[in-house]
Image (spheres, rainbow, N blue to C red):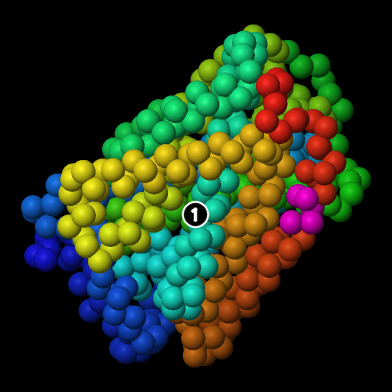
């Protein structure tokens, strides 16, 4: 296949700059691992002038908008209730601290993509690390996690519709309506098409959060706030998992970078995301908790009066829909590339087989997500389970693994490298702890909250 200069030039320059046998180092990453030719050269999204569908079209700011729309969506809605459970001081420290670590982990993902340009998703990264077994384990885990997040968006959609309409119909009906809407909006194949919607998504969540902030500031009395609280270990850890859920963007980073014109500009998009994200999380969590007090609802939009709550959820609908669509696109793209990786013509064409395969994948993902949403009807509990199973590794633990792999043989070559080695080993341990303890905590929470919402029920879940 003949490749375009625009798409290949960055990878070629990068290969000259960071040849794996050159002994050079870039940003703390030693480029000394043996080449993995499949991912050094085999980029499934590189196309030629005859391709019908072009993927590598995102500028860094479009990628930043996608990342903001993907990440700053449902996670922010649970943070005020986290402060109510953990206390103001502990909650803010955890939001900021985990945000800083997530920023570093995202940067490591960018380094890994620079080293292996052909890595388009977690399955590819797993193959670099562990061969065929790694591809299956990482790929399966990413798909399962994405489906759970789709379920979270469907669940939030049903809550929103019950609030807006005053529970005008059975909740399962709203679930089916949401399923159809999400399916239709997920049909575009390229992220650039979705990136235009991300502007509406970001505006939507900002509008909804600030509507809630203003409303609780006007309506709420002066509540008693607690800087620290006494809370059981399982409950405290479950609340921490909701903060982790708010930083759940990493598993989609390889997909975003793969559709950027120049993936080396990814750090610009990352810093833009994290600056906006951490600042907005702290402001929203602190201010809403300050006025709503210990009884703050989760999702936080439910903390206002009946009329304003309807308005807030109405404003939030675009981000509920569009952020879910971004996750669906990333998940479907992984399966789609896996099916056609050895036949790149199919990836870039608009044939009956290509379009039909894409539509079938999208439909299957959303149907499974809908089944999960109807089965785990409590918002915080579903988020905590997702965090324990997957975000523990995709956001934190795997970044440490990637760094150690890229720096194999140079972990303690100098004081700087030694410090980074300790940090990345800590990230791996942190991922393991969040996963193991989090499964216990989230399981306990689901059991305790079993009476709050009935599975497969027509009852009002708002």
Q: Quadrant of residue 334?
A: bottom left
**Left or right: 293, with 210 as reference point:** right
**Residue in front for this viewpoint, 355 or 270:** 355
Residue 280 visible, this angle: no
- The relative height of residue 445 versus residue 137 in the rendered view (above or below) is above
- The relative height of residue 111 versus residue 35 in the rendered view (above or below) is above
Quadrant containing the C terminus in the rendered view: top right
Q: Quadrant of residue 262?
A: bottom left
Quadrant containing the N terminus in the rendered view: bottom left
**Residue in front for this viewpoint, 144 or 321:** 144
Residue picked out by circle 1:
143
At 68% from the left edge and 11% from the top edge, which residue is drawn? Answer: 306
- The relative height of residue 13 versus residue 345 in the rendered view (above or below) is below
Residue 393 is one of the magenta-drawn residues: no
At 37% from the left edge and 82% from the top edge, which residue is drawn? Answer: 31
Q: Residue 95, percent across and down?
A: 66, 48
**Could you tell me how many numbered marks the image carries?**
1
At 37% from the left edge and 43% from the top edge, which residue is drawn? Answer: 360
Residue 128 visible, this angle: yes
Q: Residue 89, percent across and down?
A: 78, 45
The local crowd at label 1, few if under 14, some if 14 to 19, many if 20 or more residues have their Cα within 10 Å, is many
At 63% from the left edge and 18% from the top edge, which residue is drawn? Answer: 170
Q: Residue 143, percent across and down?
A: 49, 54
**Left or right: 215, with 188 as reference point:** right
- Main SS, magenta region, reads helix
Say which element carries label 1: helix
Q: Residue 190, percent across and down?
A: 29, 44
Magenta region, residue range = 438-443
**Left or right: 162, with 237 as reference point:** left
């Amino acid at each position: 296949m003949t490749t375009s200069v625009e798409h290949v030039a960055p990878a070629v320059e990068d290969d000259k700059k960071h040849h794996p046998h050159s002994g050079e180092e870039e940003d703390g990453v030693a480029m000394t691992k043996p080449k993995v030719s499949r991912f050094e050269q085999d980029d499934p999204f590189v196309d030629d002038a005859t391709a019908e569908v072009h993927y590598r079209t995102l500028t860094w700011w479009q990628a930043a908008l996608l990342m903001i729309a993907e990440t700053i969506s449902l996670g922010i809605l649970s943070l005020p209730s986290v402060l109510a459970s953990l206390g103001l001081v502990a909650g803010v420290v955890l939001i900021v601290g985990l945000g800083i670590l997530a920023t570093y982990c995202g940067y490591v993902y960018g380094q890994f993509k620079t080293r292996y340009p052909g890595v388009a998703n977690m399955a590819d990264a797993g193959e670099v690390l562990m061969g065929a077994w790694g591809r299956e384990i990482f790929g399966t885990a990413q798909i399962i996690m994405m489906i759970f997040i789709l379920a979270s968006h469907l669940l939030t959609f049903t809550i929103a519709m019950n609030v807006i309409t005053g529970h005008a119909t059975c909740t399962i009906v709203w679930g089916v309506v949401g399923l159809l809407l999400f399916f239709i909006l997920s049909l575009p194949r390229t992220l650039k098409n979705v990136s235009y919607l991300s502007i509406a998504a970001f505006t939507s969540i900002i509008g909804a959060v600030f509507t809630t902030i203003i409303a609780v500031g006007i309506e709420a009395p002066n509540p008693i706030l607690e800087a620290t609280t006494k809370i059981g270990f399982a409950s405290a850890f479950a609340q921490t998992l909701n903060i982790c859920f708010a930083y759940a963007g990493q598993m989609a980073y390889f997909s975003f970078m793969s559709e950027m014109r120049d993936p080396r500009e990814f750090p610009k998009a990352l810093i833009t995301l994290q600056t906006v994200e951490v600042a907005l999380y702290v402001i929203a969590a602190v201010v809403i908790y300050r006025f709503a007090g210990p009884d703050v609802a989760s999702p936080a939009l439910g903390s206002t009066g009946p009329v304003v709550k309807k308005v807030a959820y109405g404003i939030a609908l675009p981000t509920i829909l569009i952020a879910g669509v971004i996750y669906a696109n990333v998940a479907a793209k992984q399966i789609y590339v896996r099916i056609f990786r050895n036949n790149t013509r199919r990836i870039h064409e608009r044939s009956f087989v290509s379009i039909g395969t894409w539509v079938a994948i999208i439909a299957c993902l959303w149907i499974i997500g809908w089944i999960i949403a109807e089965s785990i009807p409590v918002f915080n509990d579903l988020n905590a389970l997702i965090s324990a199973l997957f975000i523990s590794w995709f956001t934190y633990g795997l970044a440490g693994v990637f760094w150690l792999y890229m720096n194999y043989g140079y972990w303690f070559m100098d004081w700087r490298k030694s410090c980074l080695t300790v940090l990345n080993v800590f990230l791996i341990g942190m991922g393991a702890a969040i996963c193991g303890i989090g499964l216990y905590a989230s399981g306990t929470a689901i059991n305790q909250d079993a009476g709050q919402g009935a599975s497969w029920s027509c009852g009002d879940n708002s």
